[in-house]
Image (cartoon, helix red, strand yellow):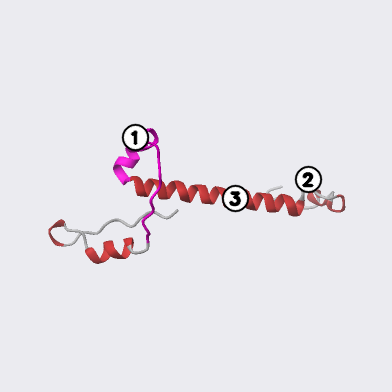
Amino acid sequence: MGAAPRMQTGRAGRLDSTYVSTYIINMKPVQILMDEELLAGLDEDEEVRRSGRSKVLRGLVSAYLESRREALLDAQYRKGYGDDLRVSEELEGWDEEGSWPGE
């Protein structure tokens, strides 16, 4: 997940509205339901206080999607190659033929 761009300020420390609107225009608001205890725990977190709920939740969703993608790739690999990851008999011995630098 890429880091969010730093907010840039113009004169008198005001946010550059062109920069902010360009960054925000690529996001859509999403409403989720969360029980009060979970929300209170989220709001007590230091990173949430520093960066905000939205940024933390975007990071969690991104990590979840990456984890799911990796699990899918692993499943496809196992389906294609099977759970037996040993070198097939026809390739046995070839690992002894090569030499590593410095040997």
**Where residue 9 appears, x then y in whole percent?**
20, 59
Q: Which of the two labelled residues, at mark 2 and mark 3, occupies the earlier sequence position?
A: 3
Q: Is residue 71 above or below residue 24?
A: above
Q: Nearer the viewer, residue 1 or 90?
A: 1
Which residue is identified by label 2? 84
Which circle marks residue 70 in the picture?
Answer: 3
- The range drawn in magenta is 27-52
Q: Which of the two labelled residues, at mark 1 and mark 3, occupies the earlier sequence position?
A: 1
Using residue 50 as the reference point, say whether residue 37 is left or right of it: right
The amino acid pointed to by label 2 is Asp
The amino acid pointed to by label 3 is Glu
Q: Which of the two labelled residues, at mark 2 and mark 1, occupies the earlier sequence position?
A: 1
Q: Nearer the viewer, residue 89 or 76?
A: 76
Which circle marks residue 64 in the picture?
Answer: none
Q: Residue at x 37, y 59 (%)?
A: 28
Q: Which residue is most to the right? A: 90
In the rendered structure, does residue 11 fall within the stretch colored magenta? Answer: no
Mark 2, secondary structure of its residue: loop
Which circle marks residue 40 in the picture?
Answer: 1
Mark 1, secondary structure of its residue: helix
Q: Taking the image as drawn, is residue 25 in sight?
A: yes
**Where residue 8 appears, x then y in whole percent?**
24, 59
Q: CA distance from mark 2 to mark 3?
A: 19 Å
